[in-house]
Amino acid sequence: QVQLVESGGGLVQAGGSLRLSCAASRQTFSDYNMGWFRQAPGKEREFVAALGWSASSAYYADSVKGRFTISRDIAKNTMYLQMNSLKPEDAAVYYCTAGSASVTAQAAGVMPRYWGQGTQVTVSS
């Protein structure tokens, strides 16, 4: 069973930074492409970033490119999303995901199979 546990959300001022973490088993990292999606109130879930299972490929939504960085630390069985230069429009519940779809497929709207419980990010203007 795939379990994904996010942490690191919170309240930050516009222009600030946050780092989200996602803990998962080593097998999950080996078997699936991992990523982050988000959902703001009244909006659909949208792709943020994804990391291929070998960590050799990363893909970002245009809205976060250059500001967010996805990475993982296999020794800690943890994936990260470093978010810099946050904007009010980045406010949402952020979900860690795992699935078999490629990073480009996820970016095109294919929803991953497994989701964490989500962590709230609030950005004040």
Image (tube, rainbow, N blue to C red):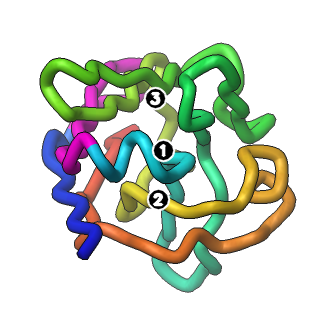
Could you tell me the amino acid type at mark 1?
Pro
Residue at coordinates 56% horizontally, 47% vertically from top-left? 33
Tell me the mark number nearer the camera, choosing from 1 and 2: 2
What SS does tag 2 mark?
Answer: strand
Note whether 120 is above or below 26 in the view shown.
below
Note whether 22 is above or below 57 in the view shown.
below
Residue 118 image label: none
Could you tell me the amino acid type at mark 3?
Leu
According to the image, label 3 marks what residue? 86
Q: Which residues are magenta?
A: 12-26
According to the image, label 2 marks what residue? 98
Could you tell me the amino acid type at mark 2?
Ala
According to the image, label 1 marks what residue? 88
Q: Which quarter of the rendered picture does the N terminus lie within? A: bottom left
Distance of mark 3 from mark 2, alpha carbons? 24 Å
Sequence-first disc among 3 and 2 = 3
The 10 Å Cα crowd at callout 2, few under 14, some 14 to 19, many 20 or more, is many
